[in-house]
Image (spheres, coloured by chain):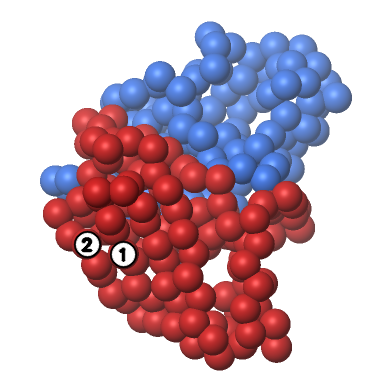
Chain colours: A blue, B red
Amino acid sequence: GAGVSQSPRYKVTKRGQDVALRCDPISGHVSLYWYRQALGQGPEFLTYFNYEAQQDKSGLPNDRFSAERPEGSISTLTIQRTEQRDSAMYRCASSLEGGGNQPQHFGDGTRLSIL
Amino acid sequence: GESVGLHLPTLSVQEGDNSIINCAYSNSASDYFIWYKQESGKGPQFIIDIRSNMDKRQGQRVTVLLNKTVKHLSLQIAATQPGDSAVYFCAENWDTGRRALTFGSGTRLQVQP
């Protein structure tokens, strides 16, 4: 597709359940990022991949959060044993690899609500 | 769609006027900066970027100015249109090896017809 695609668009689940959020980056983009955005604020970094390698996971809040990108394309962010504080908009972005920084292009996000 | 920036600072301008949105960034080591536009229900949309070795960069109807001395970034929009109404975020990267963007708090731009 033309842009970053995220699914599902909305996810409502009960506290304690595991959830998996999917991101399909822009075709040809090597780098993929996960962010979390609270209402009224800018996105906050969670983790980043180059190809299939997770380069930085310093923003993941705790060990219930994990991410993978096994074939260097689609990525999944998994939250285990969800808690109400995990409720947020989760955004994925992708960028071209290259020397120096490249613009990150964002998807429309997955709105996660934990009951 | 969801509402973005419910309690953000707001800049209100008349259609056709020029808009200037300001941002103070936090880290003097930051070497890459981006402006994003975010409409309700949408993800941040890339507008323009600038590297620290530049102090000005122009795009279509937009100009970004960087003042490293006072750690200030501004976005100028020429001939503002109703479609420019959105929340605008500046973002910085202070560690090229890390690639994480740190976002500012955002400004809501309202264009009056």
Q: Residue at x 61, y 87 (%)?
A: B15
> Which dot marks residue A96?
none
- Judging depth in this view, the residue of A111 and B109 nearest the camera is B109
Residue B92 in the image: above or below residue B9: above
Q: Do labels 1 and 2 share a chain?
A: yes
* Chain under disc 1: B
Tag 2, which secondary structure? loop
Left or right: residue A111 compared with residue B46: right
The amino acid type of the residue labelled 2 equals Asp
Left or right, residue B47 beside residue B70: right
For the C terminus of chain B, give its image quadrant. Answer: bottom right
**Foreground residue among B3 and B26:** B26
The residue located at (46%, 59%) in the rendering is: B22
The part of the image, by quadrant, that contains residue A14 is: top right
From the top left corner, tell me how far across and down residue B10 is, in percent: 66, 62
Residue to which mark 2 is pinned? B55
- 1 and 2 marks in contact (CB < 8 Å): yes
Is the residue marked by circle 1 packed among few (<14), some (14-19), or many (20+) residues within 10 Å?
some
Residue most extreme to the front: B70
Residue where numbered disc 1 is placed: B65
- For residue A80, say whether it is visible: yes
Label 1 secondary element: strand
- The answer, for residue A26, to whether it is visible in the render is no
Q: Which residue is drawn at 40% across and 19% down?
A: A58
Q: Is residue A102 left or right of residue B24?
A: left
The quadrant in which residue B87 appears is: bottom right
Q: Where is residue A39 in the image (x, y as percent from the top left)?
A: 70, 42
Q: Give the mark nearer the N terminus: 1 vs 2.
A: 2
Reply above or below: B98 against A66.
Answer: below
**What chain letter is assigned to the residue under label 2?**
B
